[in-house]
Amino acid sequence: MRLEELKQGLWGYKKDAVFQYISQLEDAFSQKMTERDAQVERIIQQDQARIRDLEQENRMLKEDLARLKDRKEQISQAILDARSSAEVLRAESLAQEEAARETIRKTLERELAELSVYREKVAALREVIKTAMAGLEQEAEEMERQVEELYEAAPAGDLTLFQ
């Protein structure tokens, strides 16, 4: 019903018509308000659901961030541990290398000393052999001289004395 459709009486609009018009307006307004309330309620529920979803996503992201921070810390610690281990290994290898050099140096010195002793023994043996050879040479010469003397002293043709 519209305002133009209201019935008029002697003193203006009829009460029943006005009440009916107001009642219709109130019903329409109530219906619109109910629809709007329902729409607002749906929007509120959607917004609350969206808020819950966002809060859940926020919690998950915070947990992911915490895990990533833990991983970052673990990686940083692993890198520091690796560097420390590398330094320790480098120091140990240098110490082992130095110990090996020292062992090789001592072994070389010992073997060179042994070689020197052998050289002296070989030189002494050489002198002994030289001396022995010289002695043998003299004895051989002496024997040759004696053989020569015996040969010269031997009777040459007359062997009748021995018959």
Image (spheres, rainbow, N blue to C red):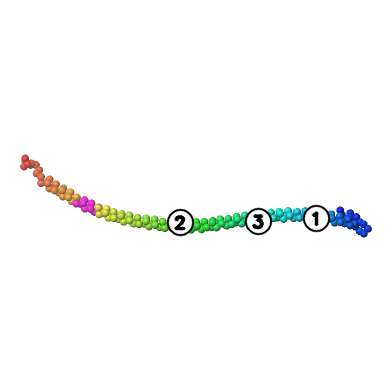
Question: Mark 3 and mark 2: span between their CA atoms?
Answer: 50 Å
Pair 3/2: label in front? 3
Q: What is the crowding at mark 3: few (fewer than 14 residues within 10 Å), some, or many (at least 20)?
A: few
Q: Earlier in the sequence, mark 3 or mark 2?
A: 3
Residue drawn where x is 33% and y is 56% of the image: 110
Q: What is the crowding at mark 1: few (fewer than 14 residues within 10 Å), some, or many (at least 20)?
A: few
Quadrant of the drawing holding the C terminus: top left
Q: Which residue is mark 3?
A: 55
Q: Nearer the viewer, residue 62 or 25?
A: 25
Q: Is residue 129 magenta?
A: yes
Residue 125: tell me if it is visible.
yes
Name the side, left or right, on which 54 lies relative to 10.
Answer: left
Q: Nearer the viewer, residue 68 or 46?
A: 46
Q: Which residue is mark 1?
A: 30
Badge 1 element: helix
Which residues lie in the magenta part? 126-135
Residue drawn where x is 33% and y is 54% of the image: 111
Badge 2 element: helix
Name the side, left or right, on which 108 lies relative to 2.
Answer: left
User: Do callouts 3 and 1 mark residues in contact (Cβ within 8 Å)?
Assistant: no
Question: Mark 2 and mark 1: span between their CA atoms?
Answer: 85 Å
Q: What is the crowding at mark 2: few (fewer than 14 residues within 10 Å), some, or many (at least 20)?
A: few
Q: Which residue is mark 2?
A: 89
Question: Mark 3 and mark 1: span between their CA atoms?
Answer: 36 Å
